[in-house]
Amino acid sequence: MENIGKYNDYVEEAKSTVDSNKYNIEDGIRALRNIHNATNKIASNGNYMLSEVLGRPETWRTYVLAAFVELAEFIQFLPWKPWRDSVKEIDSEKLLDEFADVLAFIGVLITILGYLGYTPDDIASAYINKEFVNISRFADKNKESINGTKI
């Protein structure tokens, strides 16, 4: 029975952590959007600023695909192949540089969502709701092993 109490504590801790960081999440989303908007003032997409071409579906596809490419580049600097005997040392500088690229494109995607009418609060709420679903999913999956050694 001791494991059940610990397990419930873990579930409540996860929910509380997600819920108590709501404003941090919203602030982070706002920061990414604001940074991207500031950068957009000096960057251009061809002869146009991104804000001028956001209504074009090809713009959305381009930036979503670019985000996927950056994520793929990021994963190349992680030892993600379990079948490899030798794991090379992580190049921290390259890893962080690639992750910064991922964050930059997340800023673009947040800008696109803003164009569609979604606020940082909407995005944060969707994230928090998804985390509660994930917590419940993990809780239900692991509940079966309460009397085992997983806890």
Image: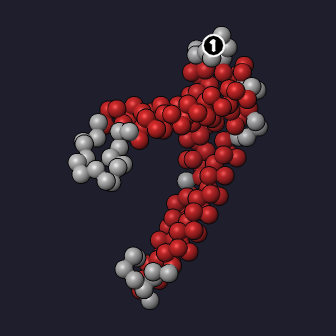
Residue 106: x %, y % from top left: 57, 36
Question: Closer to the camera, 36 or 148?
Answer: 148
If the image is split into quadrants, where does the C terminus sit? bottom left
Within the image, what quadrant is residue 75 found in?
top left
User: According to the image, label 1 marks what residue?
Assistant: 46
Mark 1, secondary structure of its residue: loop
Crowd around label 1: few <14 · some 14–19 · many ≥20 (10 Å): few
The vertical placement of 38 against 81, above or below, is above
If the image is split into quadrants, where does the N terminus sit? bottom left
Question: What amino acid is labelled 1 in the image?
Answer: Gly
Which residue: 66% across, 52% down?
126
Within the image, what quadrant is residue 130 found in?
bottom right
Question: Closer to the camera, 109 or 68?
Answer: 68
Residue 52: x %, y % from top left: 72, 19
Q: Is residue 44 left or right of residue 55?
A: left
The vertical placement of 126 against 54, above or below, is below
Q: Is residue 138 left or right of residue 148?
A: right
Residue 100: x %, y % from top left: 45, 33
Which residue: 31% across, 53% down?
83
